[in-house]
Amino acid sequence: KEWLSKGHGEYREIPSERDFFQEVKESKNVVCHFYRDTTFRCQIMDKHLSVLAKKHVETKFLKLNAEKAPFLCERLRIKVIPTLALVKDGKTQDYVVGFTDLGNTDDFTTETLEWRLGCAAIINYR
């Protein structure tokens, strides 16, 4: 219940960089998708993250438009879109950059992404 009240269990967009800091402060585990509207692969990532957000309520799943977050992208050294920043206890622990870790293909499975997030211990994966 506490997780759900903090926005866990759904995959949602945050409007600004300022919101990012507030959101990661509230939750132990956060996956933040840095995306661009014009990037097709971001839509593929969205589809998988929507499924995982419902399944893994222990983690908060967010997306942030990289074009609206230049300071954050610079600070987190985000150069490739899509990039997932995996934040644990307010600190960025790991990144999933593009689809390299996911088999380097557009048709990777949700399970593949789930496994990769599990490797980073950002979700409870068994």
Image (cartoon, grey):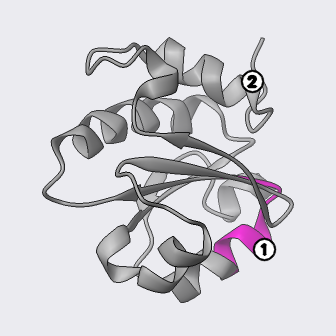
Residue type at numbered disc 1: Lys
- Residue 16 appears anywhere in the view: no
Q: Secondary structure beneath disc 1?
A: helix
Between residues 84 and 97, which one lies in front from this camera angle?
Answer: 97
Q: Which residues are magenta?
A: 22-30
Q: Does residue 69 sit above or below 10 in this rendering? A: below
Q: Position of residue 103 (x, y in %)?
A: 43, 14
Between residues 49 and 105, which one lies in front from this camera angle?
Answer: 105
Q: Quadrant of residue 15?
A: bottom left
**Horizontal side of residue 106 vs 11, given as left or right:** left
Which mark's residue is nearer the viewer, 2 or 1? 2
Q: Secondary structure beneath disc 2?
A: helix
Residue type at numbered disc 2: Cys
The residue labelled by disc 1 is: 25
Chain-order first, disc 2 or disc 1: 1
Q: Position of residue 23 (x, y in %)?
A: 66, 72
Q: Quadrant of residue 124?
A: top right
